[in-house]
Image (cartoon, coloured by chain):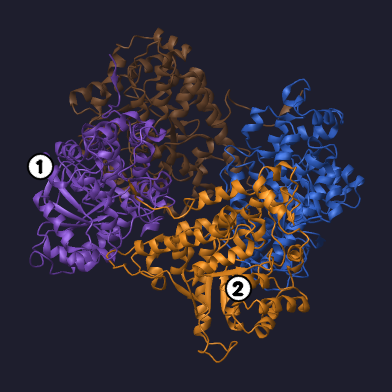
Chain colours: A purple, B orange, C blue, D brown
Amino acid sequence: MSAPYVVATAPWVGPDELREQARSVLPQPIFDYVDSGADSEATVAANRSAFAAVRPRPRVLTDVTERATTTSVLGREVALPVLLAPTGQHRLYHPDGEIGVARAAASIGTVAAMSTAGSTGIVDVAAAVPEARLWFQFYMPADRGAAEVMLAAAERADVEALCLTVDTPLPGFRERDVRNRMAFPPAVDPSDPVWADRPEWTAAYLAGPPPAQPNTAHLAAVTQVMNPALSWADVEWLRARWPKPLVLKAITRGDDARRAVEIGIDAIIVSNHGGRQLDTMPGTLECLPEVVAAVRAAEAGGFGGFGGPVGARAPVEVYLDGGVRRGLDVVKAVALGARAVFIGRPYVWALAVGGSAGVATLLASMRGEVDRSLALLGCATVDALDASFFSVPAAWS
Amino acid sequence: MSAPYVVATAPWVGPDELREQARSVLPQPIFDYVDSGADSEATVAANRSAFAAVRPRPRVLTDVTERATTTSVLGREVALPVLLAPTGQHRLYHPDGEIGVARAAASIGTVAAMSTAGSTGIVDVAAAVPEARLWFQFYMPADRGAAEVMLAAAERADVEALCLTVDTPLPGFRERDVRNRMAFPPAVDPSDPVWADRPEWTAAYLAGPPPAQPNTAHLAAVTQVMNPALSWADVEWLRARWPKPLVLKAITRGDDARRAVEIGIDAIIVSNHGGRQLDTMPGTLECLPEVVAAVRAAEAGGFGGFGGPVGARAPVEVYLDGGVRRGLDVVKAVALGARAVFIGRPYVWALAVGGSAGVATLLASMRGEVDRSLALLGCATVDALDASFFSVPAAWS
Amino acid sequence: MSAPYVVATAPWVGPDELREQARSVLPQPIFDYVDSGADSEATVAANRSAFAAVRPRPRVLTDVTERATTTSVLGREVALPVLLAPTGQHRLYHPDGEIGVARAAASIGTVAAMSTAGSTGIVDVAAAVPEARLWFQFYMPADRGAAEVMLAAAERADVEALCLTVDTPLPGFRERDVRNRMAFPPAVDPSDPVWADRPEWTAAYLAGPPPAQPNTAHLAAVTQVMNPALSWADVEWLRARWPKPLVLKAITRGDDARRAVEIGIDAIIVSNHGGRQLDTMPGTLECLPEVVAAVRAAEAGGFGGFGGPVGARAPVEVYLDGGVRRGLDVVKAVALGARAVFIGRPYVWALAVGGSAGVATLLASMRGEVDRSLALLGCATVDALDASFFSVPAAWS
Amino acid sequence: MSAPYVVATAPWVGPDELREQARSVLPQPIFDYVDSGADSEATVAANRSAFAAVRPRPRVLTDVTERATTTSVLGREVALPVLLAPTGQHRLYHPDGEIGVARAAASIGTVAAMSTAGSTGIVDVAAAVPEARLWFQFYMPADRGAAEVMLAAAERADVEALCLTVDTPLPGFRERDVRNRMAFPPAVDPSDPVWADRPEWTAAYLAGPPPAQPNTAHLAAVTQVMNPALSWADVEWLRARWPKPLVLKAITRGDDARRAVEIGIDAIIVSNHGGRQLDTMPGTLECLPEVVAAVRAAEAGGFGGFGGPVGARAPVEVYLDGGVRRGLDVVKAVALGARAVFIGRPYVWALAVGGSAGVATLLASMRGEVDRSLALLGCATVDALDASFFSVPAAWS
């Protein structure tokens, strides 16, 4: 019997193949909803090309026998610096839905951030997967009463952190969604070739809870929840209101990051919403160093934030999402200052292809990729990564 | 019933689809006449790629509930900083012609600049659309008498401004037009597949006013009007002769801009004629900062221009055309110093596809895009835009 | 009758179409012999991309009524700053051969540089076209006796200048020629589809002088003439031996240019042999400024060259070949310091397509393009061009 | 009879054609095993593009009649600065296997580095080709006893140098190998179209020694030999243990290079394992100058290495592999500081296509290309090359 030279760790080989498998099981409007970006989709591409532009400078002959992909986020260990981004509406991709996603994350030992727009509510997810580490992504409505309802749900679910998305005063414009007349809930007509073409998905979807379910209706309200009035004052209110960790999602500038630190938030996600809001943005990896530097400078300058005197607070953590596809991408982001990264599309693809088990396989596979990348870089642990392991384009600084 | 996630605002989705729709309704020589550029068409591409190279740096958590896409040009408000460039020969694209275009602009609340080479004369357009805000684009003939005839027409039409095109000492060379034997008026032979292939266009065109109409004959004379002797002395003469605002179209250098300011013109359009004159030019967006800086420097240095002592004049406005396709492009140009932009090809496509209503739809759609771009940038109004909302390639400065 | 908007000046529209027409009349081995470059053909592409990277900065409102495409080379006027490069073996492309090429150049008023490897000898060309302005391109053989024979021919032909090619110690390697088994004379077998596919060419070629003609045999010896021992000492000998202007062809470095000036040569052609010798070279336009600066510096430093005391000599002229396809390219090269440019492939294509008349048409067409480019740049004459009319990539300096 | 203008020196024309010939004779899993790189294969592409970015600055009129492609490595002359990289498993490509490769290298006069993972062991190769100059590539196992067995074999084979590969703590991940289920030994099933499609290869392979041969089993153990604990301490042990030249393969940073020099190694190979380990690396040619500078600085700073007092040691040599395809690439690497380069894929292709004779033809052909490149650069000998003959991208320094 022959021994494979390189071992496959998933039913797909690499992220491009995973994406194609997802395309083959999802109806086009659903696949496109996940895949597309704003306008010309240049930001989606920029997120990827930024990773390609950061180039390894491996050190050799460092003993890397004892490697660790673990790190911590918000003071608790995760098995790998890869968290699941809040992507919403998981039952659109697979009947396993949010509960399956939370289970997969828990099985590996990482965080699942659940969307406001989930097809299963955060309380139900928490009840179904008590071992899950859940963060709750929050589109803060203009109405404080409505906000309190959602915060109460987050408290009931005992989430670890609240993650306030700040780049959605309005929905972005995605040409493919408009062309596909994508709606929530989607108007699935099994006699229409668009849907008939993917009979397995269509049967499973139609067998699921009817579209009128509260959670789905909730989603339909998301664009109302998108709140153009959202301001720093709201963050200050929320900071006072929410005692647990508070994370701001979608900061890409140093000045905004500094202000967030001064207000007392706990973490920042450098994000451009997966390229779904503003077109022609730089890749998030390119924005990361400016944000990290501003956070560290703000901390060094001292501040009297929420939770105690200067020095009593844990360092503000910076995460990144957008374009992360391989373990080496994860390692690059961490080396440039991210505590961890979030993945979005890849785990949605894995969910579509393999349900909860697919997501677990993806996470295990990325853990292996992070591990291999560490070894090949000559850096035994995630926590030992720094910028000396990579060269960054001169134009970035 | 399902609610669409992102709302379509036009019968086409995005500028590329609009262009393809125009291609499908126009005979190839007509489509190509609009679409093509000089020589290798590199300038056409550069106009687009310059917009792609300017990257948003959105600010978050600024209250953007109260947004305004309005601004003013030459002291009067427009509903959005998008004006219609003088493109000429509108009846080639749709029977609604210039009058339809002027009506669409007026219905939204912006300016239509009418070409010397219009298929309907400026006086007739003004009479038919009294609510229109018209500017008159002027190819100044060598003969002062001929010029006076045209100026008299502009006065009769009571146009708001005169817009002197200065980059046409000669016509540019467009390979596609030569290959298509494009002529004015086009020799439309309904038995020739080139035209028969677009029967609706051909029937409508042949049902229109015969090619021998004065206005069309006027167009045939345009290349004679292209006047290689045109010089700064002519601009001085025109400045003295024309009491209303005078705009110079197609300046791309700082030194030329300074001279224009010193002569007392009111505004400059940074333009390369949509890439139709000189090949391999930089994109106009790349030229804009140099022109804006020169204008501001000239103003700061003082000048004794037309209309009164230093300080009594309104600041010289700078506009841009070339490659504007989306609302975000508009916002980028304004942020880099443009008072407003002109669109050309997009509204010609919309005219071809939907007549006057198509143009109005396009303008409404762009207004929505400008509005969304403002919101997503964290800048509530067009007038608050500045360069801090974008990063510009290092090579530009 | 309709008036064409832009007038065609040749039976082809633009250089790409001309090339395709040539491809359609020439057997593949012959077309490829002209078309191909060394190894990966990167230098061929670089010659073109260098022109695309230099971008116009047109001045407006300069009176350009009185334009002049004329300039002088080596003290004598030419109708346009475009000379014909020595390309060799013209009867391979058309029965009009070298005599047709010389006639075309003379009819327009420019120089034809004739190759050592001509299918008609320089003496015969001179006799047939007494009005021609001929330069003689010289592969200087190792043997002085052989060199004297060739110089005697050049003298008998009364050529204006001798043009010593200095980049051919060995022939370059062109994959397509090897694949096509291209040989001199080509082994034309009318029953082989390679040649049968182009019956008109094949009939004309086989009807021509037999391959054993002295001129053809001469060509077969060219690779022997390629002389790896060629050195500055040979140039010194030649400078002393040849009283008329001496031009060095294929210098691309400043230090070599300085040395050439010190030896007393009259002109330099910045050339990489059309990309046929060394692969991955920079485009010649990128090399031009370094050579021009070195030449001017060497002249400023004084030298005691051939022909008299310092100051008595005419400035050393710098020309360029490689990648010139349009009039705007010509204008760019002149603006960056070239006295004139040479074209190679384009006139060979024109010769293939239209014989001597084709070459004349091409030259007339390029004269028109130079004229239009001047007008559009706002520069009335070739001699007034300078670097202020263009921006050059920062990386070039 | 006609004389070819450029002489073919091999049954293929250029490296791309050679690769395609190899593709046509090898089953896809075998071709892909050679061809592929890690993850997205960006490093493979970067190795090539780095060569394209270094541009010749040829000097003209230097007498290049007497050229020499010879140089020395580790004190002994080679016919050209091209050595054969350790690629392993040569019988997978052709029955001539390692012995054929060693014979080809010897016939031309260069070094063959034999892989630990050879399909024929180093002792057998040495016995079969006594005239061969062999280096032995060494994956140093964690177990000193196992290491001693391999070193003993290297001693028995009397290899010239030991070449320790230091970039393989783990195998890289190559998507194509996983997709092809590539294994060692490959599970060749002549009824499977994958193999049946290449009947000649399949028959020859199956006629060879059975897969259970010790050498093949040895290979199956290679991934165990990949030793994540390998450290500088092991190199120190090996340096003390191995009296002959010791070469470290796959250093790309200056600091690692300095340390290697301080430990007393004799040479460094700048390598990224042909792009098979870490994705998105810079091309090796881009890494070369940093390594060369560090080596020279370390030597200048003095060190008390193995083998004697400061000054008694020969300069540490730096080689390069990765992306070398043409003679001009070789010349570029040498000009930028490499003593010689290694080729991998090209000679495997030549082996597949033509066996031992194919490899000899390739080497002869590359020697001719090096020779031609020298001539065209105006540099008579390999040893006279320096950086003045090329321009390097500004971004590299």
Q: Residue at x 44, y 12 (%)?
A: D196
Q: Residue at x 17, y 59 (%)?
A: A147
Quarter location, residue D235:
top left
Cβ atoms at labels 1 and 2 below 8 Å apart: no
Relative to A9, say whether A235 is above or below.
below
Report the front residue among C230 and D186: D186
Which residue matches tag 2?
B135
Q: Residue D32 at x, y = what percent? A: 41, 26
Report the front residue among A96 and D81: A96
Amino acid beneath label 1: Ala
Amino acid beneath label 2: Trp
Quarter location, residue A67:
top left
Report the front residue among A36 and D104: A36
Confirm whether residue A163 shows in the render: yes
In the image: residue A131, left or right of residue D213: left
Q: Residue furthest top?
A: D207
Q: How crowded is mark 2: few (under 14 residues within 10 Å), some or many (20 or more)?
A: many
Image quadrant in which the N terminus of chain C is located: bottom right
Q: Residue A182 at x, y = what percent? A: 37, 45
Relative to D354, say whether B188 is above or below.
below
Q: Residue A127 carries which label?
A: 1
SS category of the residue bearing label 1: helix
Chain holding disc 1: A
Q: Residue A297 at x, y = what percent? A: 22, 65
